[in-house]
Image (spheres, rainbow, N blue to C red):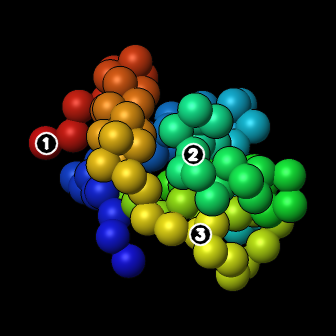
Amino acid sequence: MRWYGIDDLSHKDTEKIAATLKEMGLESSLNGLYWLPVPAHMLSCVQTEHKETCGPHVMGLELEDSWLRLELLVRARSRLRCECVQYASHELRDHMIDWLENFLQELHIHPA
């Protein structure tokens, strides 16, 4: 699995991140896993074609006691296996990493 990770987070930081993601309605049914929606204009052609049958398309964000990890795989929430489940394009990857970095900055979280 390809992912972008940030470690050396304090327990206070991870609690703040978890609370904010929950407030945003991004929490999954698994503890510590959040679903970040992929912007519609950044879906691949096949993901756009499968939007109604497989969507919404999301990227997973795992949060543990001292780290977080953004999966770079675009998942289909309505299906586990489909050709629309694929790694993020370079443009989408960069967009989501920037989003995550800005999100942490807005929360005043600056990992070492």
- Against 42, residue 33 (above or below) is below
Residue 80 falls left or right of residue 73:
right
Q: Pointer 1: what residue?
A: 112
**Mark 2 touches mark 3? (CB < 8 Å):** no
Amino acid type, label 3: Val
Inter-mark Cα distance, 2 to 1: 33 Å
Please state the horizontal and vertical placement of residue 89, each as a whole percent of the image: 38, 52
Inter-mark Cα distance, 2 to 3: 11 Å
Q: Pointer 3: what residue?
A: 85
Q: Pointer 2: what residue?
A: 43
Q: Residue furthest bottom?
A: 81
Mark 1 nearby-residue class (10 Å; few <14, some 14–19, many ≥20): few
Q: Nearer the viewer, mark 2 or mark 1?
A: 2
Inter-mark Cα distance, 1 to 3: 33 Å
Q: Secondary structure at mark 2?
A: loop
**Mark 1 touches mark 3? (CB < 8 Å):** no
